[in-house]
């Protein structure tokens, strides 16, 4: 039977009792709800690594910019709860805004991972990652799990959380989960629900473009800076042709998201893209070992 908690005190009491009843390792999966198979894959991985699984659903106002989709973000708690119960989550944490920010959002202390938070998605969504790292820190401190699972779909977010955990010595392990995709390649996302039928048909071009770029990177052994920039520009052009408004297409080192400037021999790279399809901003990425 899955339990529910709606504030920190309740949450801690239930986690304590799970541990008292033999849960040696507790896993945590934070989400914003509107759950799909990608989220459920994180919970299943959490289950494999732990004796008890805590899932949070909180549409975090701190990580949405002015004019973004905070108010229309899909909310379907009862459907989500039934799905989580069916795959064996032990505790669903559903905090409300007032309990998490008793002094208001403006006065809330912040946790910031500089540099990594300012590039790529951080450049086009100022303040977004500070909102993420602040809420994730609060949730980590509330749940006090032994491990947490995050999706590689949000590759930059995962890199930032790993850095935060290392820099601030959070005593938990972070596990990255590969991206779950629709059969046509589109990365699952709660935001896919925003797409019109026509946009949904075009959407797989984002991942298809990344795959083509990855193929070209693999075939070329020595790429200089200008070759990389040309490949990035070709990726942006391909997205434009498919009806996207590209925000960025970037080839980076997978470990720290820095620009590979020495050519790409022997490196773990990642190609990341963000692009708008109508009103909907989609992101995706692909790993490439050259
Ligand atoms: P969200 O609810 O979108 O904030 O995502 C919650 C967690 O699920 C994050 O760790 C995401 O990276 C992860 N996630 C979202 N979509 C996917 C996907 N398609 N595959 C794997 N993980 C995902």
Image: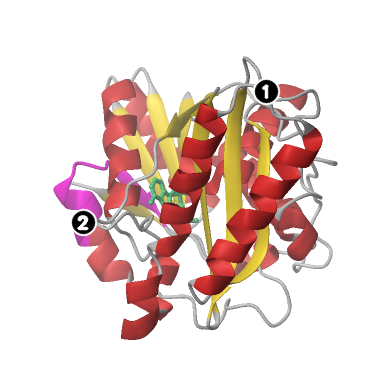
Q: Residue at x 48, y 54 (%)?
A: 209
The disc placed on residue 92 is none
**Compared to 80, does 20 lie above or below?**
above
For the C terminus, the image quarter is: top right
In this figure, which residue is indicated by the disc labeled 2?
83
Circle 2 sits in a helix, a strand or a loop, which is it? helix
**For the residue carrying disc 1, how many other residues have a C-alpha within 10 Å: few (<14), some (14-19), or many (20+)?**
some
In this figure, which residue is indicated by the disc labeled 1?
222
**Compared to 100, does 39 lie above or below?**
above
Relative depth, front residue between 167 and 141: 167
Circle 1 sits in a helix, a strand or a loop, which is it? loop
Q: Is residue 83 magenta?
A: yes
Query: Residue 56's spot in the image, x, y percent?
Result: 43, 51
Q: Residue at x 51, y 77 (%)?
A: 243
Relative depth, front residue between 87 and 178: 178
| Residue 16: quarter of image | top left
**Compared to 64, does 233 lie above or below?**
above
Query: Residue 27's spot in the image, x, y percent?
Result: 40, 31
Q: Foreground mark, 1 or 2?
A: 1
Query: Residue 253's spot in the image, x, y percent?
Result: 67, 30
Q: Is residue 166 magenta?
A: no
Q: Residue at x 36, y 58 (%)?
A: 186
Query: Residue 259's spot in the image, x, y percent?
Result: 77, 35
């Amino acid at each position: 039977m899955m339990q529910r908690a709606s504030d920190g005190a309740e949450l801690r009491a239930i986690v304590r009792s799970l541990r008292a009843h033999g849960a040696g390792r507790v896993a945590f999966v934070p989400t914003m709800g509107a759950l799909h198979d990608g989220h459920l894959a994180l919970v299943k991985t959490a289950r494999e690594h732990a004796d008890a699984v805590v899932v949070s659903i909180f549409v975090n106002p701190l990580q949405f910019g002015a004019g973004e989709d905070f108010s229309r973000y899909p909310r379907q708690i009862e459907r989500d709860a039934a799905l989580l119960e069916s795959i064996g989550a032990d505790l669903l944490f559903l905090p409300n805004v007032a309990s998490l920010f008793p002094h208001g959002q403006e006065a809330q202390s912040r946790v910031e991972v500089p540099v990594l938070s300012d590039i790529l998605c951080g450049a086009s969504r100022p303040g977004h990652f500070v909102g993420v790292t602040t809420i994730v820190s609060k949730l980590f401190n509330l749940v006090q799990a032994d491990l947490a699972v995050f999706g590689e779909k949000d590759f930059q977010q995962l890199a930032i959380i790993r850095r935060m955990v290392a820099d601030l010595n959070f005593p938990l392990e972070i596990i990255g989960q590969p991206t779950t995709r629709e059969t046509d390649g589109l990365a699952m996302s709660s935001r896919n629900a925003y797409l019109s039928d026509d946009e949904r048909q075009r959407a797989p071009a984002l991942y298809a473009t990344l795959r083509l770029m990855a193929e070209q990177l693999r075939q070329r052994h020595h790429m200089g800076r200008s070759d990389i920039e040309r490949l990035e520009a070709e990726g942006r052009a391909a997205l434009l042709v498919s009806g996207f408004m590209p925000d960025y297409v970037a080839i980076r080192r997978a470990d720290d998201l820095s620009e590979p400037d020495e050519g790409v021999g022997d490196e773990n790279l990642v190609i990341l893209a963000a692009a708008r399809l109508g009103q909907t901003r989609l992101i995706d990425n692909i790993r490439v070992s050259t």
